[in-house]
Image (tube, rainbow, N blue to C red):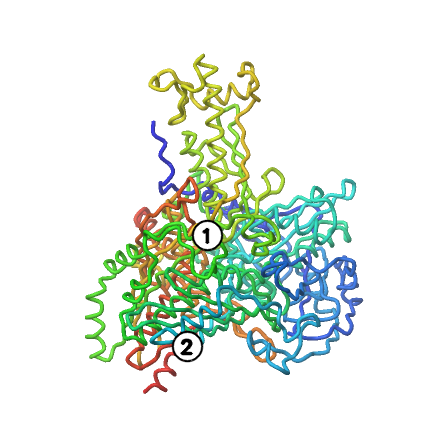
């Protein structure tokens, strides 16, 4: 039943035998111990589990680990490099873009993807870009501020 | 060196772990030998459990054990920790068991549990359990459940009534109404909401047989209370045999205050299975098994003179408590609701009667604001209805009735606040500021011009008050005149300055997003004059923190913050005495400023707090009778609550073709007293406004006639998204609370409490050309469109 998958996560190559039904979110959390990726729902609404798969934001609760075979995945743990926060991480800290922090890893990954595609979004484009990520604490306002701050800080 | 940290918008100390994925939430906790539980839940809203067959599930590979309610018969039903007016009126109590045995009274109640090696296997095995139910008739409506012929849920609760509670003066209110020039009657429905913290609930329990000790990890806002309730009221073991840890908690909004069946079940399983057991709630479970909020059906009568002065308010509310009681369910629609019905106004006569009822729906308990949003909705809608009836400007009616700055401390009429008094305020100042911010006069012109073009703009106000900083223990507790809360409500702090000069603060409150690790540290850094980085705040673990009642009711700053502050004052006193000894000066000549104790007038003759802490810790030379170490514990019982206030203003446009409501502007002027960290305060207000606006326009739990929750997932229940809101425009005034040395009032719930009626009032203002005065929330496009069609 088990199937072998090879997935590169945050720069490290892993080969594991997994059940075909195993979700990528659970592969990351339970097989690799990368618990920064949170699971907040069971209907792909909340976006807390968002990761980059081959550079594109996906909800890892809606991807099977076997579908990710051969891909490169970046999780929240892989964003900072050489002890330096990614500009989007730093922006969330600077602008108080988080409270309880549970949606934050998925939110940050989504914003990385958003800014990759649109380095200088308008407020409306930002709010539209966050459509797949729910936050219950912030009312989104400081998340929007954080995205704008990150956009300024990032090389276009 | 100035160490001005109190009042500064300092970045949060807790954030680095949260933005990097380093934080450990409940589901991130791993233990050797950890097993996983999955719970079989009732698909019926009301049914007898005739039999449960578990043998197939028990034989499923990977399954360790399967249990039903019969296996936990010896455990009592869970405690109800807040009976309405406990000891004075009867509460017909019915609370859940760890697993139900004979009967279920709402969908989602647990009837069996599987423990397996992994969570996929546990979920698989649930499908192999066979339960034979006998469905029973169902009732879901808060009021209709009391009607003759309604299905009866509990033998001890005739007509499904849990309690019949009242406050104020019925005769006075009737007289006030008869003295009025106009009396407005209305039915106001405050619909049921589903709180939806982004992290669902979860629990891990571990039992160590040799020491007979339990360690329990829980998504909790109040780990000390959880331990108290579980050990003393459910398991009958010494409180000292259990340690409860709340790890990083991903939001709560009230839902994580309570003792739920699943937590006790994990504790029982850990012992039965002999291995640590984890249960992590799925979102769908969260919808049916975690508490809901609001769900009031209210009839009001409000009387006023022609000049707008209110003569009386009479309120009758049916409060839906669900199929069975949550931990403090009865306290929310009574003390925290009826007692706040004077709002910001000098209402001469008030009477409120609340019937708490059982229905075949999920448990209802505190949700952000907890009673106070429901009270504010009643008062602020009532004031607008008076304005509409008298054809007065809604701001004028408010001004006519405001409690004035000279009236404080103010006791609302008919002793409805049961002996407490509003602390301080200037309600008109906040309203004036809001009117300037929104440009009221020019808006009214714009509105009139728009109407001529067939566009419907509206503006709505909410000049709210609320009550934070709960609470004086004798007032809220089960004392003869108390409110029936089954314990106390003081708060605790321990401040220790270590040999190295670094400060560790442990507190009895618990952060689940509020930022205690930063704000409590700001209080300490300010008072002791140490760098903020030198202060570490530890919380959320019964091991190593003093007993505290936890975080809810916007109490952490006013009550817990004061405990922290008081400890710093006592530490400074000791530091001055020790410094005097070190400097060979007289203790009474010493003063303390900016992290140094020195002889008054000679700041060069000083010892730093770090030097003093080192001397105190080493204890080589202390004044006679002085104990080593700078360490103080405070248990602080507040003398009064605190009463934030302000003005919220919403501007909407209603699309006449679709009924869609668009929020064009949202403004708030909040007075929360002194602010420890304005950035965090604004964040709390943003989030609160979002939840309150969402109640007005989008959110609502829907049960069908069979008691099925048809809004039972994030696909079906409208948790708002980023694109739903404009940028909120925040202003503030600052009226320090005289009731605590920090001058703080509290801010966790103000946004939610204030905003809902402002939005509804705005929509009613927009619809006033149609003669529409009242619609029930949520104001969905269909509802608004239908109302406009039938008004044409």
Q: Nearer the viewer, residue B593 or B288?
A: B593
**Callout 1: residue from which chain?**
B
Q: Which mark is residue B468?
A: 1
State the SS at label 1: loop
Compare residues B414 and B460 and report the one nearer the observer: B414
Residue B196 visible to an observer of this rendering = yes
Residue B231's spot in the image, x, y percent? 70, 49
- When asked about the image quadrant of residue B120, the answer is bottom right
**Does B730 appear above or below A21?**
above
Left or right: B121, with B218 as reference point: right
Camera-near label (1 vs 2) is: 2
Dot 2 lies on which element? strand
The image quadrant where one finds the N terminus of chain B is top left
The residue lying at 70 percent from left, 41 percent from top is B240
- As drawn, the label of residue A121 is none
Q: Position of residue A90 (x, y in %)?
A: 39, 45
* Direction from residue B43 to residue B400 in the image, left or right: left
């Amino acid at each position: 039943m088990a199937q072998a998958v090879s997935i590169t996560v945050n720069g490290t190559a892993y080969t594991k035998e997994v059940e075909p039904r195993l979700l990528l979110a659970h592969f990351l959390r339970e097989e690799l111990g990368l618990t920064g990726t949170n699971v907040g729902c069971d209907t792909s609404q909340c976006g807390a589990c968002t990761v980059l798969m081959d550079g594109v934001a996906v909800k890892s609760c809606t991807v099977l680990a076997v579908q990710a075979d051969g891909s490169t995945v970046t999780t929240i743990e892989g964003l900072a490099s050489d002890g330096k926060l990614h500009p989007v991480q730093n922006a969330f800290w600077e602008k108080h873009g988080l409270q309880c922090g549970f949606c934050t890893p998925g939110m940050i990954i989504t914003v990385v993807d958003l800014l990759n595609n649109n380095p200088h979004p308008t407020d409306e484009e930002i709010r539209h870009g966050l459509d797949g990520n729910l936050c219950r604490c912030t009312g989104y306002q400081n998340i929007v501020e954080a995205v704008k701050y990150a956009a300024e800080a990032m090389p276009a | 060196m100035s160490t001005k940290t109190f009042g500064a918008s300092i970045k949060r100390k807790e954030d680095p772990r949260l933005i990097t994925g380093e934080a450990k939430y409940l589901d991130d906790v791993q233990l050797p030998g950890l097993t996983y539980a999955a719970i079989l839940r009732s698909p019926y809203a009301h049914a007898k459990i005739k039999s449960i067959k578990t043998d197939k599930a028990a034989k499923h590979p990977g399954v360790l054990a399967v249990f039903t309610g019969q296996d936990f018969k010896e455990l009592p039903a869970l405690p109800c920790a807040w009976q309405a007016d406990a000891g004075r009126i009867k509460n017909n109590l019915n609370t859940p068991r760890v697993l139900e045995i004979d009967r279920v009274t709402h969908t989602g109640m647990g009837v069996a549990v599987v423990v397996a090696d992994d969570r996929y296997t546990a979920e698989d095995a649930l499908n192999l359990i066979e339960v034979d139910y006998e469905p029973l008739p169902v009732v879901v409506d808060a009021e209709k459940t009391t009607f003759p012929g309604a299905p009866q849920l509990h033998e001890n609760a005739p007509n499904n009534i849990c309690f019949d509670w009242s406050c104020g003066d019925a005769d006075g209110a009737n007289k006030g109404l008869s003295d009025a020039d106009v009396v407005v009657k209305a039915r106001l429905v405050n619909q049921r909401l589903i709180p939806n913290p982004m992290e669902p609930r979860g629990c891990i329990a571990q039992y160590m047989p040799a020491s007979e000790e339990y360690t329990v990890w829980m998504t909790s806002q109040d780990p000390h209370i959880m331990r108290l309730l579980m050990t003393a009221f459910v398991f009958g073991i010494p409180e000292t045999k259990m340690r409860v840890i709340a790890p990083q908690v991903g939001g709560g909004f009230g839902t994580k205050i309570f003792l739920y069946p699943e937590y006790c079940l994990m504790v029982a399983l850990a012992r039965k299975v002999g291995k640590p057991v984890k249960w992590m709630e799925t979102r769908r479970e969260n919808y049916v098994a975690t508490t809901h909020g609001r769900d009031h059906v209210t009839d009001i009568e409000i009387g006023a003179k022609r000049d707008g002065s209110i003569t009386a308010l009479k309120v009758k509310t049916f409060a839906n408590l669900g199929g069975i009681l949550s931990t403090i369910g009865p306290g929310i629609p009574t003390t925290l609701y009826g007692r706040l019905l004077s709002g910001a106004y000098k209402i001469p006569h008030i009477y409120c009667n609340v019937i708490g009822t059982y229905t075949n729906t999920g448990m209802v308990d505190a949700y952000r604001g907890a009673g106070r949003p429901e009270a504010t909705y009643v008062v602020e809608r009532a004031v607008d209805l008076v304005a509409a009836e008298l054809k007065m400007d809604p701001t004028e009616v408010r001004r006519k009735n405001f409690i004035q700055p000279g009236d404080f401390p103010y006791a609302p009429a008919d002793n409805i606040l049961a002996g407490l008094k509003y602390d301080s305020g200037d309600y008109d100042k906040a309203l004036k500021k809001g009117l300037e911010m929104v440009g009221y006069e020019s808006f009214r012109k714009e509105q009139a011009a728009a109407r001529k073009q067939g566009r419907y703009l509206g503006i709505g106000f909410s000049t709210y008050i609320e009550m934070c900083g709960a609470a004086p223990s004798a007032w809220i507790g089960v004392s003869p005149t108390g409110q029936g809360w089954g314990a106390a409500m003081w708060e605790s702090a321990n401040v220790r300055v270590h040999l190295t000069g670094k400060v560790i603060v442990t507190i009895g409150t618990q952060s689940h997003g509020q930022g205690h690790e930063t704000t409590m540290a700001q209080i300490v850094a300010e008072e002791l004059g140490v760098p903020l980085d030198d202060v570490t705040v530890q919380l959320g673990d019964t091991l190593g923190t003093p007993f505290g009642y936890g975080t809810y009711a916007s109490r952490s700053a006013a009550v817990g913050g004061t405990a922290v502050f008081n400890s710093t004052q006592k530490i400074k006193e000791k530091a001055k005495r020790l410094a005097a000894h070190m400097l060979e000066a007289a203790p009474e000549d010493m003063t303390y400023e900016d992290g140094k104790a020195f002889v008054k007038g000679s700041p060069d003759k000083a010892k730093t707090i770090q030097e003093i802490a080192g001397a105190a810790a080493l204890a080589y030379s202390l004044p006679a009778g002085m104990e080593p170490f700078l360490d103080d514990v405070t248990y602080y019982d507040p003398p009064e609550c605190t009463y934030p206030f302000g003005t919220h203003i919403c501007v909407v446009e209603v699309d006449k073709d679709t009924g869609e409501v668009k929020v064009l502007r949202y403004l708030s002027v909040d007075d929360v007293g002194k602010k420890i960290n304005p950035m965090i305060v604004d964040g709390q207000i943003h989030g609160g406004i979002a939840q309150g606006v969402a109640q007005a326009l989008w959110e609502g739990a829907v049960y069908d006639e069979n008691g099925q929750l048809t809004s039972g997932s994030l696909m079906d229940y409208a948790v708002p998204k980023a694109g739903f809101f404009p940028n909120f425009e925040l202003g503030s005034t600052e009226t320090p609370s005289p009731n605590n040395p920090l001058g703080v009032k509290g801010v966790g719930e103000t946004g939610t409490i204030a905003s809902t009626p402002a939005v509804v009032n705005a929509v009613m203002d927009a619809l006033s050309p149609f003669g529409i005065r009242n619609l029930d929330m949520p104001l969905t496009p269909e509802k608004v469109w239908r109302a406009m069609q039938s008004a044409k």
